[in-house]
Image (cartoon, rainbow, N blue to C red):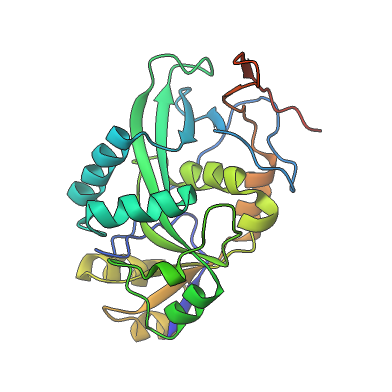
Amino acid sequence: MTTQIEPVAIHSNGGAGLLLPEKTDEFSSGSQLSKIGKRFFEPGTYARDGSFVFVRNPTEQELTETHAMLDEAIGPIAPLAVVKSVYTRNPLSWWVLWRAEDRSRRTPRIAGVAAYVPLNEPGLAALRAGRFNGRDPDFACVAARNEEPAALYLWGLVAHGLSDLAGKLVGHVIGLDLYETLPMIGTIATEEGLAALRRSTKSALDAEKLVIGSTFEIKLPPKHIAHQRAMPGWEGEQVTAGGRFIREHADHA
C-alpha cells in the first residue's frame, strides 16, 4: 500500500523514516528562476532570515561529511560505499545545501543535504511491488547519468528550517517540467516517522492503515508548485570553454 499525502513540507529518510514537517519559506524580491523547461546550474535564493542558500553537488569530502550528517540526524540510509556508487552513477542523487551571507556565495557553510535514489522504470516498478531495497539499491533499478528518472526514492533530507526550500531548489536543478511530474516515494522505518506521517495525513482512515514498512508518496500541492515556479533566484558560476568564470543571473519574466 502506498499512501498519498499533500504536506506543506514533509521529507523522509528511507532508512530511518524520519519526517520533518515545517513551514514554507518566503522569499525576498529578485529575478525569477522559473522557466518550466529549463534546468538551472547550482540555483540559489534568499531565505526568510536574509541569508542566501543554494544547492550543488558535493566533492568527495563533502559527500562523506554530509553522509555522516544524515546518519547522525536520522539514522543510516545506506553504507557510504553504496552512496558513493549511486552518486557516481547519477549525480542527481546527492545535493548539499549551502548558506552564505549574500548571492556572492563567499565563505558558505553547509546547511543541509538532500539525498535521493533516481529510479528508472524498472526501479519504480520494483519499488511499487515491494522489491526495492533502499539501503542497497540494485543498479538495474537506478537511472543512469543523463537518463531522465521515472521517480525519486527519498533517501533522506536534513536542512533545519530550510527543507522545503532545499526541495524547491533541487526541483530547479532537475527542471520543473520533469520534477513536478516525478513520483517521490519514501518508506516508513521507525515509530517516530510513523507518528509524524500519521499527523500529516488528513484522512484518519489512511493514517490508521500506515505501519512500519509502509511506503508513502508525496504529492506537491498547487500552492507549493506555484511558489516553486515563481521563486526568485540566481544561478551559480560556470566555466566557459576558455576557462573564464561567468555568473549567470536568471531573469525570466
The residue lying furthest to the right in this view is 253
State the image quarter where residue 35 is shown.
top right
**For this view, does 226 lie left or right of residue 206?**
right
- Residue lying at 23% horizontally and 65% vertically, measured from the top left: 192
- Residue lying at 37% horizontally and 76% vertically, measured from the top left: 132
Q: Note whether residue 139 is visible.
A: yes
Q: Note whether residue 203 is visible.
A: no
Q: Is residue 13 above or below residue 3?
A: above
The residue lying furthest to the front in this view is 242
State the image quarter where residue 141 is shown.
bottom left
Residue sitting nearer the eye, 71 or 161? 71
Quadrant the C terminus occupies: top right
- Residue lying at 58% horizontally and 32% vertically, measured from the top left: 27
Could you tell me residue 6's position as x and y percent?
52, 66
- Residue lying at 54% horizontally and 30% vertically, measured from the top left: 44
Could you tell me residue 42's position as x and y percent?
54, 33
Q: How many marks?
A: 0
Q: Is residue 191 above or below residue 76?
A: below
Residue sitting nearer the eye, 43 or 85? 85
Could you tell me residue 4's position as x and y percent?
50, 75
**For this view, does 251 lie left or right of residue 209?**
right
Q: Is residue 53 above or below residue 214?
A: above
Quadrant the N terminus occupies: bottom left
Could you tell me residue 207's position as x and y percent?
38, 79
